[in-house]
């Protein structure tokens, strides 16, 4: 745990006067990460290796106090460094042990997106050098909504909070380079009122400890993680454990307010997790992380999310949804799109995986699922959304999921079972902890099958109409 170093940084921040920015020949960091769908998300000029987050949250007031220690490497000479931070107020910033000037820019009034913390270090950051940036911040997180109008990011409820960030909501609770390509490891120390439970990604370190009516939970995520997959959910949870293949620890948290029927459904679904992990290992290769589990909240944001190692579920966890979110640990979390336009590489694969699981349970074949999708009339708006470029406002359209999955089944028929399942395993294992594009998938599919597949992918993934021949 790195809190002592944070405490030292805090003391220095209070005693060292602010210094001016120098090095006129250097350049400011970019205020966006370059994603065409969300140009204000992310930043340029550096690469983050690790976030050490100290958080204190009081559900009674909604106040969040945080200290983020960000370990990064500059990739160019920087006179300023931008971090995404939305709706919270930075109190002071250190670069190393030296105070830095900073300013904050609000969200875009039209889109409701953005929010920048602009850090001006006393001395320009040099390319290739490692730095530690400390940000102390506070505020009451707002209730931002995603592109569909659903709550996302740090979503407050009377009894706690549910955190689900996709696509760029991590900045609602900590300063971050909020793009899928800048994966990092994480430590979390979360302080909540005694009696509450705080859950994050990865593994719980030691036993939570209580002092003066506040309990601290310390979590560590050892594997690289995209920021949208982080969580720090808080509430009245009951914990349970399972063991997966090769002793994989599974730690589940189910909130106490679930209705009896939803609790029964959830318990039955979670009981299948070890079997599901073994099943998907047969498809994609070894489970890519060091732990797994679930967070089932009795409040709702209207969806489930594949937060890394521990998906979050709203009010109930059905069997098909658990299978979907588990499959994402391979396809979406370990193997992550470079840009949001390729989200079908997440959702199409996870939906197809869900179909495979259902077939193994005698709940209908994958081909029957394909036939149901392909039976949708050609003039239905479903076919107007190409999975390979759905648009920011229709990022989560049904076609991203179901047409993407149908494309995979069509590919299976095209290249045969042996090559298709070899492709799935190669996709997950060769790209582990990396970022990918649809072009990468096309290249790998052609390599595995020996076939030219550009036309196939053009019809199924990029054409805004129903495929009739391919």
Image: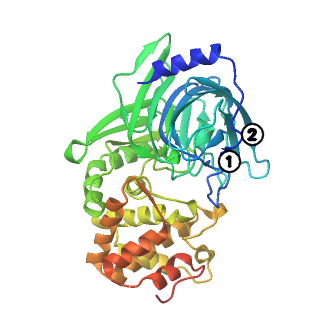
Give residue 118's position: percent from left, percent from top: 69, 38
Q: Residues within 10 Å of mark 1 (few under 14, many from 20)?
A: many
- Report whether 215 appears left or right of 284: right
- Front of the two marks 1 and 2: 1
- Reading the chain from its start, which is encountered first: label 1 or label 2? 1
Residue under the image location 29 percent in, 50 percent down: 272
Which of the labelled discs sits on residue 49, or is there none? none
Instruction: Say if residue 434 shows up in the picture.
Output: yes
Q: Tell which of 154 and 11 is nearer to you.
A: 11
Name the residue tied to disc 1: 31
Q: Nearer the viewer, residue 366 or 38?
A: 38
Q: Secondary structure at mark 1?
A: loop
User: Which quarter of the rendered picture does the N terminus lie within?
Assistant: top left
Q: What is the residue that sits farthest to the top in this orientation? A: 212
User: Looking at the picture, how far across and down is residue 72, in whole percent?
Assistant: 51, 39
Instruction: Name the residue: 61% across, 34% down.
Output: 156
Residue where numbered disc 2 is placed: 105
The secondary structure type at the circle numbered 2 is strand
Q: Residue furthest right?
A: 109
Q: Is residue 215 left or right of residue 154?
A: left
Q: Are marks 1 and 2 in contact (CB under 8 Å)?
A: yes
């Amino acid at each position: 745990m790195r809190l002592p170093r944070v405490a030292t940084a805090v003391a220095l921040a209070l005693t060292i006067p602010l210094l001016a920015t120098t090095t006129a020949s250097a350049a400011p960091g970019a205020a966006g990460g370059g994603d065409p769908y969300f140009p204000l998300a992310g930043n340029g000029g550096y690469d983050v290796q690790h976030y050490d987050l100290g958080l204190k949250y009081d559900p009674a007031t909604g106040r969040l106090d945080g200290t983020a220690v960000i370990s990064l490497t500059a990739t160019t000479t920087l006179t300023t460094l931008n971090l995404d931070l939305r709706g919270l107020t930075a109190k002071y910033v250190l670069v190393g042990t030296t105070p830095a000037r900073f300013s904050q820019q609000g969200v875009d009034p039209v889109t409701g997106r953005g929010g920048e913390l602009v850090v001006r270090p006393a001395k320009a950051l040099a390319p290739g050098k490692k730095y530690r940036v400390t940000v102390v911040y506070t505020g009451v997180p707002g209730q931002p909504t995603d592109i569909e109008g659903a709550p996302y990011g740090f979503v407050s409820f009377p009894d706690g909070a549910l955190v689900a960030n996709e696509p760029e909501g991590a900045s609602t609770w900590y300063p971050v380079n909020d793009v899928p390509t800048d994966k990092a490891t994480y430590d979390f120390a979360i302080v909540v009122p005694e009696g509450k439970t705080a859950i994050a990604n990865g593994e719980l370190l030691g036993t939570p400890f209580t002092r003066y009516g506040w309990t601290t939970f310390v979590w560590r995520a050892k594997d690289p993680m995209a920021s949208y997959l982080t969580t720090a959910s808080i509430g009245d949870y009951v914990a349970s454990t399972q063991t997966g293949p090769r002793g994989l620890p599974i730690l589940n948290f189910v909130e106490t307010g679930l209705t009896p029927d939803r609790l029964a459904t959830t318990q039955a679904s979670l009981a299948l997790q070890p079997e599901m992990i073994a099943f998907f290992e047969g498809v994609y290769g070894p489970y890519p992380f060091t732990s797994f589990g679930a967070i089932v909240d009795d409040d709702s944001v209207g969806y489930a999310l594949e937060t890394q190692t521990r998906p979050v579920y709203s009010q109930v966890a059905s069997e098909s949804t658990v299978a979907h979110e588990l499959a994402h640990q391979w396809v979406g979390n370990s193997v992550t799109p470079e840009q949001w336009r390729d989200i079908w590489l997440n959702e199409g694969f996870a939906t197809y995986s869900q179909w495979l699981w259902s077939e193994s349970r005698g709940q209908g074949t994958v081909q029957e699922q394909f036939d149901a999708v392909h039976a949708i009339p050609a003039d239905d708006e479903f076919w107007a959304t190409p999975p390979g470029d759905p648009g920011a406002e229709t990022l989560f359209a049904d076609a991203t999921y179901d047409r993407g999955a149908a494309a995979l089944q069509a590919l299976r028929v095209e290249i045969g079972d042996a090559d298709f399942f070899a492709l799935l395993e190669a996709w997950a294992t060769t790209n582990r902890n990396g970022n990918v594009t649809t072009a990468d998938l096309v290249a790998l599919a052609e390599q595995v099958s020996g076939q030219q597949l550009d036309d196939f992918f053009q019809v199924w993934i990029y054409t805004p109409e129903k495929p009739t021949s391919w």
